[in-house]
Image (spheres, rainbow, N blue to C red):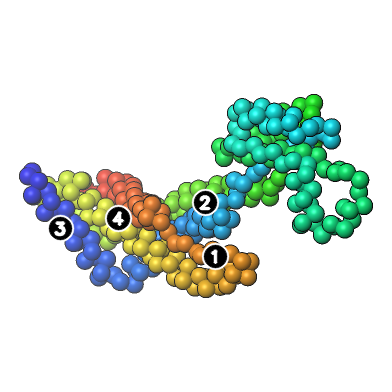
Amino acid sequence: MSPATLATRHAQALLGALGRMARSPLATVFTLLVIGLALTLPAALGLLVTNAEAATGGFTQAVDMSVYLKSGVSLQRAQRLAERARTIPGIKTVTVISAAQGLREFRKYSGFGAALDVLHGNPLPNVLHIVPQPGSSSAVDLERLRRDLAAWPAVDMVQLDAQWALRFNAILGVLRRLVSTAAVLLGAGVLAVVGNTIRLEILNRHAEIEVTKLVGGSNAFVRRPFLYTGMLYGLGGAALAWLILEAVLIGLTGPVARLAQLYGSGFVLTGLTGRQCGGLFGGGLALGWLGAWIAAHRHLRSIEPRA
């Protein structure tokens, strides 16, 4: 079979599938609606995770440590300890905050400037401010680093700052797992919907399929229009899911912007990226094709022309 003939037959199968869907508009709309809603939920959860990460401004990885040295440790020794800390794998930056600098900042921001005047000397120690590498910000890695630094003789205490970021990362991890689970479960639902729709269409065209096989039509030839029907359902459901998400985003953009403004943030909701749109439409197309292939492969084998 020449490529031109094969392309013609595929075009005929595609147009035939479109025509049959157009002749049953109500059934087609309901099927597309079910598929679209099934695809909307995992896509919406994915958008929630993406916007939650964007709303934090990247601070979900802003985990750092404050290493408080003992009161007798001089600034020169603190500088040497900082050089030693910079050689430890997993540490991005080390900054020395001198006791004098710490006292000035405390006096400026604490509101207890007058009370500090009655103190004799500076009670604050020198501090090492450590920022770990982004790839070393798991709870296990940070706790190991904290224990190693706390074991130094000159260290009085190690405080792990931004515990909220670790907790927020953990919540986002749960949401990502939920997105994957929802995608698998609802993807199975899309397969069931498409498969059942194709099964009903095969039953309605039972006599036509028998005649086609009687004149020499192969299973692949008979199956082709059903595969295109499944793919069209998948693409149509993905397009409907995209429209639903865009409508929801349009409705939420104003309220979210006002809420962000109250918190002094310029955060704006973002829609699906090009990669996410590709995943949505590609997933819908693949699920539609697979559901149609499973139904057609199962039911077409039982239809044979009668003598």
Q: Which mark is residue 179?
A: 2
- Whether the residues at callouts 3 and 2 have beta carbons within 8 Å, the answer is no
- Whether the residues at callouts 4 and 2 have beta carbons within 8 Å, the answer is no
Q: Position of residue 264 (x, y in %)?
A: 61, 66
Distance between the alpha carbons at the discs numbered 1 and 3: 52 Å
Which secondary structure lies at badge 4?
Answer: helix
Q: Residues within 10 Å of mark 4 (few under 14, many from 20)?
A: many
Residue nearer the viewer, 123 or 131: 123
Q: Which mark is residue 231?
A: 4
* Mark 3 lies on residue: 12
Q: Residues within 10 Å of mark 2 (few under 14, many from 20)?
A: many
Q: Quadrant of the N terminus?
A: top left
Which secondary structure lies at badge 3?
Answer: helix
Q: Position of residue 42 (x, y in %)?
A: 48, 55
Distance between the alpha carbons at the discs numbered 3 and 2: 38 Å
- Whether the residues at callouts 1 and 2 have beta carbons within 8 Å, the answer is no
- Whether the residues at callouts 3 and 4 have beta carbons within 8 Å, the answer is no
Which dot, 3 or 2, sits closer to the camera? 2
Determine the residue positioned at 81% across, 39% down.
Answer: 125
Q: How many marks?
A: 4
* Amino acid bearing label 3: Gln
Residue nearer the viewer, 210 or 62: 62
